[in-house]
Image: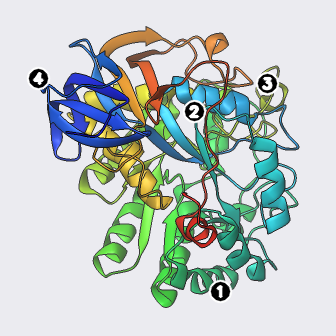
Amino acid sequence: MTERLDLVIRARRVVTSAGEVACSVAIAGGQIVALESYDSSVQADRQLVLDNDLVLLPGLVDSHVHICEPGNTGWEGFETATRAAAAGGITTLVDMPLDSMPVTIDVPSLNEKAAAAEGKCHVDVGFWGGVVPGNIRSLRPLLEAGVLGFKCFLVDSGLEDFPPVDAASLEVALAELAPTGCPLLVHAEDDETVAAQLVPSGPSYAEFLATRPKTIENRAVEVVVTAARRTGGWAHICHLSSAEALPLLAAARASGVHVTAETCPHYLSLTAEQVPDGATTFKCYPPVREAANRDALWEGLAAGVLGLIVSDHSPCTAEMKHLDDGNFGAAWGGISSLQLSLPVVWTAARCRGFGLGDVARWMAEDTARLAGLSWKGRIAPGYDADLVAFAPDEDFTVEAAALFHRNKVTPYDGRKLYGVVRTTLLRGETVGGSAPAGSLLRHPAAANRSGARP
């Protein structure tokens, strides 16, 4: 190899798409340029030799994160969220278009969000645009300005400035986006079914769960599948918690409908039976369901019906969680888990016979594909040198106070987990210092039009 290298990483276990191998990863200009044998004579300005208890993973890509800045930075901000992401082995995240002020539904609001993020990000950050009633003409300009795709709700989001779309508007949006190849991410809960439920109140988790039955998700998934079939657009189901919807998704995919789906660490690790009354840190929409449902979601991952695992990091202040009175009806619905996603998933996956290659596919390769980031999510030549040195057999106990999230509110506090992130590299450089080195990512089509690298 004649090219001058910046870094060579030698590891006995490197997770690639072809499986785990012992090799040397050659890096130049922030990219992986070659995978050589472990004992290769390849030289570089720097060399990192991993201990035998460490595994080299691709940096994770979390395509579902609510950062809340600008406007609600007291909930979470770019500096704290990206620092937490780096500590958890996440090197790229994509920010959701709501929970910030303004919401990202047109080019001016996108520019405002990008300005708020500039210079604060410890990892790379991209943005989803929002689909709301009346903004269909803003979608193409948003894509040209660099968003990676779009997100909508079929149910009240809880925010007046991000209202839901109906079935007809969903089809219009999918038809508009179909020629672009970009996904439309859908919060799939049925508005009419939700409206027919009693309003939850008080500390009983069982009563709260009863107000959000699986039929709410199942009916919404039917609507999404129908719209995707009619339009040929790419519909992506966000944070699926109802395993009853898996057969419908499997049948749709088998018939050629372009529909994909994700689930989250909390649905794969927590169960309704474990949630104490008043423990509002567990509240999210859709809710954490029963153990049998959790096990069926793992079967969906094994079968490939579910393809992605994302955090859906949805932070808020401690006061918004109503920790003092444990009122599930009044508490904010969202779980903070950005820094813990990898160990939470790995702890559950290793007990079910899955390997780190599976985890890398669910949390790096396929999430990068959803966001159109074709240069992220794999350890292979031509990909960004976003890498994680991971100790899979080392355990630790979660201390919420030690997390980098702005608000230290998490249902995992005190839980024993397996898998410790030792080092995170972004384009070949160690992340974790005081100087943020992350970049703001743009859709490849927008970058190509401007002549810039995405």
For residue 194, above or below residue 89 = below
The residue carrying mark 3 is 318
Quarter of the image for the N terminus: give it: top left
Q: In this view, does 119 lie to the left or right of 172?
A: right
Cα–Cα gap, marks 3 and 2: 17 Å
The residue carrying mark 2 is 338
Name the residue located 42 percent from the left edge and 25 percent from the top edge: 343
The residue carrying mark 1 is 172
**Sequence-first tag of 4 and 2:** 4
- Kind of residue indicated by mark 2: Leu
Single out the residue that lies furthest toward the front: 2
Residues at discs 4 and 3 in contact (Cβ within 8 Å): no
Q: Which of these two is toward me, 424 or 61?
A: 424
Cα–Cα gap, marks 4 and 3: 51 Å
For residue 34, above or below residue 344 = below
Name the residue located 58 percent from the left edge and 16 percent from the top edge: 413
The residue carrying mark 4 is 39
- In the picture, residue 122 is in which quadrant? top right
CA neighbours of label 1 inside 10 A, class few (<14), some (14 to 19), many (20+): some
Q: Can residue 154 be seen in this view?
A: yes
**Sequence-first tag of 2 and 1:** 1
Name the residue located 72 percent from the left edge and 30 percent from the top edge: 79
**Sequence-first tag of 1 and 3:** 1
CA neighbours of label 3 inside 10 A, class few (<14), some (14 to 19), many (20+): some
- Residue depth check, mark 4 versus mark 1: number of the one nearer the observer: 4
Q: What element carries label 4?
A: loop
**Sequence-first tag of 4 and 3:** 4
- Residue depth check, mark 4 versus mark 2: number of the one nearer the observer: 4
Pinpoint residue 292: horizontal percent, then vertical percent.
37, 42
